[in-house]
Protein backbone atom coordinates (compact mmCIF):
# COMPACT_ATOMS: atom_id res chain seq x y z
CA UNK A 1 0.00 0.00 0.00
CA UNK A 2 2.80 2.41 0.90
CA UNK A 3 4.49 1.85 -2.43
CA UNK A 4 1.21 2.62 -4.20
CA UNK A 5 0.76 5.83 -2.20
CA UNK A 6 4.39 6.89 -2.73
CA UNK A 7 4.26 6.38 -6.47
CA UNK A 8 0.72 7.34 -7.46
CA UNK A 9 -0.98 8.86 -4.40
CA UNK A 10 -1.04 12.53 -5.40
CA UNK A 11 -1.84 11.80 -9.04
CA UNK A 12 -4.56 9.34 -8.05
CA UNK A 13 -6.19 11.86 -5.72
CA UNK A 14 -6.10 14.60 -8.35
CA UNK A 15 -7.54 12.39 -11.12
CA UNK A 16 -10.20 10.83 -8.89
CA UNK A 17 -11.43 14.08 -7.33
CA UNK A 18 -11.43 15.86 -10.69
CA UNK A 19 -13.43 13.04 -12.30
CA UNK A 20 -15.95 13.09 -9.45
CA UNK A 21 -16.39 16.87 -9.58
CA UNK A 22 -16.92 16.65 -13.34
CA UNK A 23 -19.85 14.31 -12.73
CA UNK A 24 -18.37 10.86 -13.34
CA UNK A 25 -19.67 8.11 -10.99
CA UNK A 26 -16.27 7.47 -9.38
CA UNK A 27 -16.37 7.99 -5.59
CA UNK A 28 -13.24 9.73 -4.33
CA UNK A 29 -13.67 9.35 -0.57
CA UNK A 30 -12.17 5.80 -0.55
CA UNK A 31 -9.12 7.15 -2.40
CA UNK A 32 -8.65 9.94 0.13
CA UNK A 33 -8.95 7.44 2.99
CA UNK A 34 -6.44 5.11 1.34
CA UNK A 35 -3.90 7.89 0.73
CA UNK A 36 -4.37 9.28 4.24
CA UNK A 37 -3.74 5.84 5.71
CA UNK A 38 -0.68 5.31 3.54
CA UNK A 39 0.85 8.61 4.63
CA UNK A 40 0.12 7.84 8.29
CA UNK A 41 1.97 4.52 8.04
CA UNK A 42 5.10 6.05 6.54
CA UNK A 43 8.05 6.82 8.83
CA UNK A 44 8.66 10.45 9.68
CA UNK A 45 6.38 13.47 9.79
CA UNK A 46 3.21 13.06 7.75
CA UNK A 47 1.64 16.51 8.13
CA UNK A 48 3.44 18.25 5.28
CA UNK A 49 2.60 15.48 2.74
CA UNK A 50 -0.98 15.46 4.04
CA UNK A 51 -1.30 19.20 3.50
CA UNK A 52 0.08 18.75 0.00
CA UNK A 53 -2.48 16.07 -0.84
CA UNK A 54 -5.21 18.24 0.68
CA UNK A 55 -4.20 21.16 -1.53
CA UNK A 56 -4.18 18.91 -4.61
CA UNK A 57 -7.64 17.58 -3.77
CA UNK A 58 -9.10 21.06 -3.25
CA UNK A 59 -7.53 22.27 -6.50
CA UNK A 60 -8.99 19.36 -8.48
CA UNK A 61 -12.40 19.91 -6.92
CA UNK A 62 -12.40 23.62 -7.73
CA UNK A 63 -11.34 22.96 -11.33
CA UNK A 64 -14.18 20.49 -11.93
CA UNK A 65 -16.76 22.55 -10.07
CA UNK A 66 -15.77 25.68 -11.99
CA UNK A 67 -16.59 23.91 -15.25
CA UNK A 68 -20.14 23.25 -14.02
CA UNK A 69 -20.39 26.74 -12.49
CA UNK A 70 -19.74 28.34 -15.86
CA UNK A 71 -21.96 25.80 -17.64
CA UNK A 72 -24.79 26.79 -15.30
CA UNK A 73 -24.10 30.47 -15.90
CA UNK A 74 -24.11 30.07 -19.67
CA UNK A 75 -26.81 27.44 -20.23
CA UNK A 76 -28.92 27.75 -17.06
CA UNK A 77 -31.87 25.40 -16.97
CA UNK A 78 -30.51 23.10 -19.67
CA UNK A 79 -27.44 22.32 -17.56
CA UNK A 80 -29.53 21.58 -14.47
CA UNK A 81 -31.90 19.28 -16.33
CA UNK A 82 -29.02 17.41 -17.96
CA UNK A 83 -27.34 16.79 -14.61
CA UNK A 84 -30.53 15.51 -13.02
CA UNK A 85 -31.00 13.05 -15.87
CA UNK A 86 -27.54 11.66 -15.06
CA UNK A 87 -28.38 11.26 -11.36
CA UNK A 88 -29.56 7.98 -9.86
CA UNK A 89 -31.99 10.04 -7.77
CA UNK A 90 -32.89 12.46 -10.55
CA UNK A 91 -36.53 12.87 -9.48
CA UNK A 92 -35.55 14.48 -6.18
CA UNK A 93 -32.10 16.00 -6.72
CA UNK A 94 -33.38 19.18 -8.39
CA UNK A 95 -36.19 19.78 -5.91
CA UNK A 96 -34.00 19.20 -2.86
CA UNK A 97 -31.20 21.39 -4.18
CA UNK A 98 -33.58 24.24 -5.04
CA UNK A 99 -34.96 24.21 -1.50
CA UNK A 100 -31.55 24.09 0.16
CA UNK A 101 -30.26 26.86 -2.10
CA UNK A 102 -33.39 28.94 -1.59
CA UNK A 103 -32.92 28.74 2.18
CA UNK A 104 -29.16 29.12 2.57
CA UNK A 105 -28.02 30.64 -0.71
CA UNK A 106 -24.50 30.04 -1.97
CA UNK A 107 -23.40 29.17 1.59
CA UNK A 108 -24.86 25.70 0.98
CA UNK A 109 -21.72 24.92 -1.04
CA UNK A 110 -19.80 24.72 2.26
CA UNK A 111 -21.57 21.45 3.11
CA UNK A 112 -22.97 20.32 -0.25
CA UNK A 113 -20.30 17.65 -0.79
CA UNK A 114 -21.46 15.82 2.33
CA UNK A 115 -25.05 15.45 1.03
CA UNK A 116 -25.49 12.93 -1.83
CA UNK A 117 -26.72 14.58 -5.02
CA UNK A 118 -26.66 18.11 -3.61
CA UNK A 119 -23.20 19.12 -4.80
CA UNK A 120 -23.86 17.93 -8.33
CA UNK A 121 -26.73 20.38 -8.84
CA UNK A 122 -25.92 23.19 -6.39
CA UNK A 123 -22.72 24.14 -8.24
CA UNK A 124 -24.33 24.81 -11.66
CA UNK A 125 -27.34 26.31 -9.86
CA UNK A 126 -25.00 28.87 -8.30
CA UNK A 127 -23.80 29.69 -11.80
CA UNK A 128 -27.32 29.91 -13.16
CA UNK A 129 -28.21 32.25 -10.29
CA UNK A 130 -25.27 34.46 -11.35
CA UNK A 131 -23.45 34.17 -8.04
CA UNK A 132 -20.24 36.20 -7.96
CA UNK A 133 -17.13 34.15 -8.75
CA UNK A 134 -15.20 35.15 -5.58
CA UNK A 135 -18.13 34.06 -3.40
CA UNK A 136 -18.43 30.80 -5.30
CA UNK A 137 -14.72 30.04 -4.93
CA UNK A 138 -14.81 30.92 -1.23
CA UNK A 139 -17.69 28.68 -0.22
CA UNK A 140 -16.91 25.89 -2.67
CA UNK A 141 -13.31 25.95 -1.50
CA UNK A 142 -14.38 25.69 2.13
CA UNK A 143 -16.62 22.74 1.28
CA UNK A 144 -13.90 21.00 -0.74
CA UNK A 145 -11.39 21.51 2.07
CA UNK A 146 -13.69 20.13 4.77
CA UNK A 147 -14.66 17.14 2.62
CA UNK A 148 -11.09 16.23 1.64
CA UNK A 149 -9.82 16.77 5.19
CA UNK A 150 -12.47 14.35 6.47
CA UNK A 151 -11.38 11.64 4.03
CA UNK A 152 -7.69 12.06 4.75
CA UNK A 153 -8.37 12.28 8.49
CA UNK A 154 -10.34 9.05 8.48
CA UNK A 155 -7.42 7.40 6.72
CA UNK A 156 -5.00 8.65 9.36
CA UNK A 157 -7.19 7.58 12.29
CA UNK A 158 -7.97 4.14 10.87
CA UNK A 159 -4.69 3.53 9.08
CA UNK A 160 -4.11 0.09 10.65
CA UNK A 161 -7.60 -1.08 9.77
CA UNK A 162 -7.20 0.21 6.20
CA UNK A 163 -3.89 -1.62 5.92
CA UNK A 164 -5.56 -4.86 7.06
CA UNK A 165 -8.30 -4.46 4.46
CA UNK A 166 -5.76 -3.80 1.69
CA UNK A 167 -3.76 -6.86 2.74
CA UNK A 168 -6.92 -8.95 2.62
CA UNK A 169 -7.81 -7.65 -0.84
CA UNK A 170 -4.29 -8.33 -2.09
CA UNK A 171 -4.55 -11.95 -0.92
CA UNK A 172 -7.86 -12.30 -2.71
CA UNK A 173 -6.26 -11.12 -5.94
CA UNK A 174 -8.69 -10.98 -8.84
CA UNK A 175 -11.48 -12.02 -6.50
CA UNK A 176 -11.26 -8.62 -4.79
CA UNK A 177 -12.10 -6.85 -8.04
CA UNK A 178 -15.05 -9.19 -8.55
CA UNK A 179 -16.37 -8.46 -5.06
CA UNK A 180 -16.04 -4.72 -5.55
CA UNK A 181 -17.77 -4.96 -8.92
CA UNK A 182 -20.63 -6.97 -7.43
CA UNK A 183 -21.03 -4.45 -4.61
CA UNK A 184 -21.13 -1.53 -7.07
CA UNK A 185 -23.59 -3.32 -9.34
CA UNK A 186 -25.80 -4.16 -6.35
CA UNK A 187 -25.83 -0.50 -5.28
CA UNK A 188 -26.79 0.74 -8.75
CA UNK A 189 -29.47 -1.97 -9.03
CA UNK A 190 -30.91 -0.99 -5.65
CA UNK A 191 -31.15 2.68 -6.64
CA UNK A 192 -32.73 1.70 -9.96
CA UNK A 193 -35.24 -0.54 -8.18
CA UNK A 194 -36.16 2.28 -5.78
CA UNK A 195 -36.80 4.62 -8.71
CA UNK A 196 -38.81 2.02 -10.61
CA UNK A 197 -40.91 1.32 -7.50
CA UNK A 198 -41.61 5.04 -7.12
CA UNK A 199 -42.67 5.42 -10.74
CA UNK A 200 -44.91 2.34 -10.57
CA UNK A 201 -46.60 3.73 -7.44
CA UNK A 202 -47.69 6.83 -9.38
CA UNK A 203 -50.34 6.84 -12.04
CA UNK A 204 -49.11 7.18 -15.60
CA UNK A 205 -51.96 9.47 -16.73
CA UNK A 206 -50.79 12.83 -18.10
CA UNK A 207 -52.30 15.71 -20.06
CA UNK A 208 -50.47 16.78 -23.20
CA UNK A 209 -49.68 20.46 -23.92
CA UNK A 210 -51.96 20.38 -26.98
CA UNK A 211 -54.88 19.13 -24.89
CA UNK A 212 -54.30 21.82 -22.26
CA UNK A 213 -54.23 24.53 -24.92
CA UNK A 214 -57.47 23.18 -26.39
CA UNK A 215 -59.16 23.57 -23.01
CA UNK A 216 -57.82 27.11 -22.63
CA UNK A 217 -58.97 28.13 -26.11
CA UNK A 218 -62.42 26.67 -25.44
CA UNK A 219 -62.79 28.78 -22.31
CA UNK A 220 -62.51 25.73 -20.06
CA UNK A 221 -59.07 26.45 -18.58
CA UNK A 222 -58.36 24.25 -15.57
CA UNK A 223 -56.75 25.43 -12.35
CA UNK A 224 -53.05 25.34 -13.21
CA UNK A 225 -50.43 24.83 -10.47
CA UNK A 226 -46.74 25.63 -10.90
CA UNK A 227 -44.95 23.64 -8.17
CA UNK A 228 -41.36 24.46 -9.13
CA UNK A 229 -39.27 25.53 -6.17
CA UNK A 230 -38.51 29.28 -5.84
CA UNK A 231 -34.85 28.74 -6.76
CA UNK A 232 -35.79 27.19 -10.07
CA UNK A 233 -38.26 29.98 -10.82
CA UNK A 234 -35.40 32.44 -10.34
CA UNK A 235 -33.39 30.57 -12.96
CA UNK A 236 -36.36 30.25 -15.33
CA UNK A 237 -38.62 33.23 -14.45
CA UNK A 238 -41.52 32.30 -16.71
CA UNK A 239 -44.87 30.60 -16.12
CA UNK A 240 -47.68 29.26 -18.21
CA UNK A 241 -50.34 32.02 -18.31
CA UNK A 242 -52.80 31.66 -15.44
CA UNK A 243 -50.59 29.38 -13.34
CA UNK A 244 -50.73 29.61 -9.54
CA UNK A 245 -47.64 28.86 -7.45
CA UNK A 246 -48.07 25.96 -5.01
CA UNK A 247 -45.98 23.68 -2.80
CA UNK A 248 -46.81 19.98 -3.05
CA UNK A 249 -45.87 19.57 0.62
CA UNK A 250 -48.51 22.07 1.77
CA UNK A 251 -51.92 21.19 0.40
CA UNK A 252 -54.04 22.81 3.13
CA UNK A 253 -54.68 26.00 1.16
CA UNK A 254 -55.71 24.06 -1.94
CA UNK A 255 -58.05 21.82 0.02
CA UNK A 256 -59.72 24.86 1.57
CA UNK A 257 -59.93 26.96 -1.62
CA UNK A 258 -60.84 24.82 -4.61
CA UNK A 259 -63.92 22.68 -5.30
CA UNK A 260 -63.37 18.94 -5.48
CA UNK A 261 -65.08 18.56 -8.87
CA UNK A 262 -62.94 21.10 -10.75
CA UNK A 263 -60.22 20.18 -13.24
CA UNK A 264 -56.60 20.73 -12.18
CA UNK A 265 -53.30 20.52 -14.06
CA UNK A 266 -49.93 20.50 -12.30
CA UNK A 267 -46.45 21.03 -13.68
CA UNK A 268 -42.98 20.80 -12.13
CA UNK A 269 -39.36 20.82 -13.30
CA UNK A 270 -38.38 17.26 -12.41
CA UNK A 271 -37.89 14.42 -14.91
CA UNK A 272 -40.96 12.23 -15.51
CA UNK A 273 -43.15 14.82 -13.72
CA UNK A 274 -42.68 12.84 -10.50
CA UNK A 275 -43.37 15.74 -8.11
CA UNK A 276 -46.46 16.72 -10.11
CA UNK A 277 -47.68 13.11 -10.20
CA UNK A 278 -47.10 12.74 -6.46
CA UNK A 279 -49.13 15.90 -5.76
CA UNK A 280 -51.88 14.76 -8.13
CA UNK A 281 -52.12 11.46 -6.27
CA UNK A 282 -52.40 13.30 -2.94
CA UNK A 283 -55.17 15.55 -4.26
CA UNK A 284 -57.10 12.61 -5.71
CA UNK A 285 -56.84 10.88 -2.35
CA UNK A 286 -58.28 14.04 -0.77
CA UNK A 287 -61.33 13.86 -3.04
CA UNK A 288 -60.40 15.87 -6.13
CA UNK A 289 -61.74 14.02 -9.15
CA UNK A 290 -59.82 15.39 -12.14
CA UNK A 291 -56.14 16.13 -11.48
CA UNK A 292 -53.38 15.51 -14.03
CA UNK A 293 -49.69 16.38 -14.39
CA UNK A 294 -48.66 18.23 -17.55
CA UNK A 295 -46.40 15.97 -19.58
CA UNK A 296 -42.99 17.59 -19.97
CA UNK A 297 -43.90 20.59 -17.84
CA UNK A 298 -43.33 24.16 -18.95
CA UNK A 299 -40.49 23.09 -21.27
CA UNK A 300 -42.84 20.90 -23.30
CA UNK A 301 -45.40 23.72 -23.33
CA UNK A 302 -42.86 26.15 -24.75
CA UNK A 303 -41.51 23.51 -27.11
CA UNK A 304 -44.99 23.10 -28.58
CA UNK A 305 -45.02 26.81 -29.41
CA UNK A 306 -47.36 28.06 -26.69
CA UNK A 307 -46.77 31.32 -24.89
CA UNK A 308 -45.42 31.95 -21.40
CA UNK A 309 -45.44 34.99 -19.11
CA UNK A 310 -42.52 36.49 -17.27
CA UNK A 311 -42.99 36.35 -13.50
CA UNK A 312 -43.82 39.80 -12.13
CA UNK A 313 -45.03 41.31 -15.43
Image (cartoon, grey):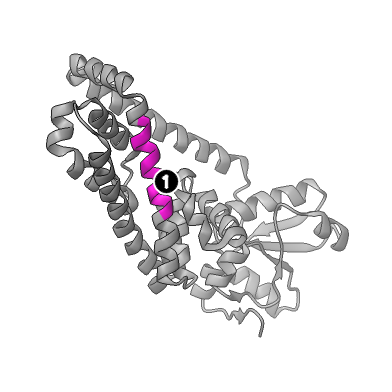
Question: What is the secondary structure assignment of the residue under circle 1?
Answer: helix
Task: Look at the picture and state if 142 lies above or below 78.
Answer: above
Residue 27 vs residue 301, the one in the foreground? 27
Horizontal and vertical percent position of residue 43: 19, 26
Determine the residue positioned at 40% across, 35% down: 188
For image coordinates 31% across by 41% down, the residue present is 26
Looking at the picture, does residue 129 appear above or below residue 84? below
Q: Position of residue 244 (x, y in %)?
A: 72, 70
Would you say the magenta stretch is mainly helix, strand or loop? helix
Q: Which residue is mark 1?
A: 146
Q: Nearer the viewer, residue 78 or 197?
A: 78
Q: Does 19 sit above or below residue 226?
A: above
Residue 18 covered by magenta stretch? no
Q: Residue at x 52, y 55 (%)?
A: 108
- Percent of width and height locating residue 193: 48, 34
Q: Is residue 19 visible?
A: no
Residue in the foreground of this view, choosing between 57 and 258:
57
* Outermost front residue: 45
Q: Residues within 10 Å of mark 1 (few under 14, many from 20)?
A: some
What segment carries the magenta color? 142-154
Quadrant where the C terminus sits is bottom right
Amino acid sequence: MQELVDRYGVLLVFANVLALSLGLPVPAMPTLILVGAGLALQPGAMWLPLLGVLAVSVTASLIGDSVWFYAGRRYGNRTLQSLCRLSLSRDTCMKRTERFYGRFGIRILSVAKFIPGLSMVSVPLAGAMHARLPLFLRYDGVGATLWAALGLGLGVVFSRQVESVIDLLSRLGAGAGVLIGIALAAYVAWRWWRRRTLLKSLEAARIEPDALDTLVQAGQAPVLFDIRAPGFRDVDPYVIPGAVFADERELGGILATYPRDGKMVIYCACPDEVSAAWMAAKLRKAGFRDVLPLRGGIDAWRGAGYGVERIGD
